[in-house]
Amino acid sequence: MSNEIEVIGQPMSELAMSRPPEVVLAEAQKAAAALKEVISKKSKPVIMNGEQYLEYEDWQTVGHFYGLKVRTGDAVPVEINGIHGAKAQAWVVDLHTGREIGGAEAYCLRDERNWETKPWFQLASMAQTRAGSKSLRNVLAWVVVLAGYKPTPAEEMAGMFPAKPTIPQVRPQSVKPEDGAGSSSESARPPTQQASDAPAQSAAEFARQKAEEMPDDPYVDGLIAKHTLPAPGKSGVNRPGILTIETKDGRSLDMKYWGKNRPSGIGELGNSYCRVFYATKDGQRGTEYWITKLDWIPEPVTYQEDSPEK
């Protein structure tokens, strides 16, 4: 039997370019330059092993240049070789035609260092985020590389590099009032009563440490329903500011920050819907949520599941 491949029917026609290459490259270079301008203003770019990676919102920015949006499907539980986790799919939609022009699926499993103890909703959210960024990467990686960035989404790199050493946090046993602030009974208050008045330096160190570990920190998307400014506590120790976030899944979370780390843009017209990256810290009165990064994002757009006929 011959091993040669028999060609049946008419041979394939030659590929043809739809537009001149110089026009396509000129547009891509313009998009790459605009992307670099946006990324250069990020307060906390994702740098791993000396290389810069783009986060999901950065990929969405490139998508907007070309009129592309991502439609993300539901995350579903999976088990692979005995490892549990979440799987999600996403599709790139051309807003001009309504057609799906690309897609991807992604996972978030408990054998990853940063996700082995996280609750299900966080695994599901990360699987959806990875699927969204990966689907855009499959369509737009060539533009991102042209801008000088690595083509792999930052969310897929989580856990690829070792974590930075943990800085031990030491809570003082008592706080002395200064210049007569507070009474003697307040200064002698036992440590368990001071949990909500955590010393600013210790909490700030904790928030800074967690911020340096980005992009592994979980996040929530939602509306800022209330903003409580930092203020002095009864013992003379400053209390943190609090953003009350109404999340997409119907929860209300109080996210804390210290005055020097106040997220920029709070109170500006049009800045209400955001993505808040956070770290958790268990205190005397339960779990506390500390803001490590806040990005302003547009309110989510719901796409119809039934796409136009292709």
Image: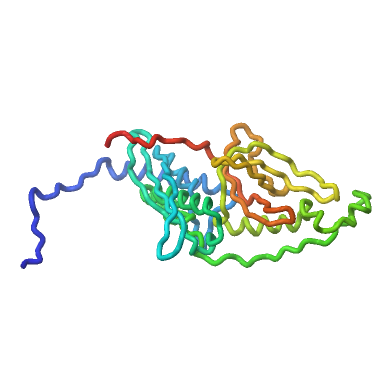
Residue found at x 53% / y 55%: 46
- The residue that appears at 9% across and 55% down in the rendered structure is 7
Would you say residue 55 is visible in this rendering? no
Above or below residue 71? Residue 171 is: below
Q: Is residue 31 left or right of residue 310?
A: right
Q: Quadrant of residue 23?
A: top left
Q: Residue shown at 68%/45% (left/top)?
A: 262
Residue 133 in the figure: left or right of residue 248:
left
Q: Nearer the viewer, residue 247 or 269?
A: 247
Q: Tell me the quarter of the picture where residue 216 sits.
A: bottom right
Q: Is residue 52 visible?
A: yes
Name the residue nearer the viewer: 43 or 36.
43
The N terminus lies in which quarter of the figure? bottom left
Q: Is residue 129 left or right of residue 185?
A: left
The extreme top residue here reads 269
Estimate the x, y position of residue 180 in percent, counting from the top left.
Answer: 93, 50
Q: Quadrant of the C terminus?
A: top left
Residue 281 screen position, x and y as percent: 67, 56
Q: Image point 47% across, 45% down: which residue?
A: 35
Q: How many marks?
A: 0
Q: Position of residue 170 (x, y in %)?
A: 75, 63
Coordinates of residue 264 in the picture (x, y in percent): 64, 42
Give whichever of 199, 304 is nearer the camera. Answer: 304
The type of colouring in the image is rainbow
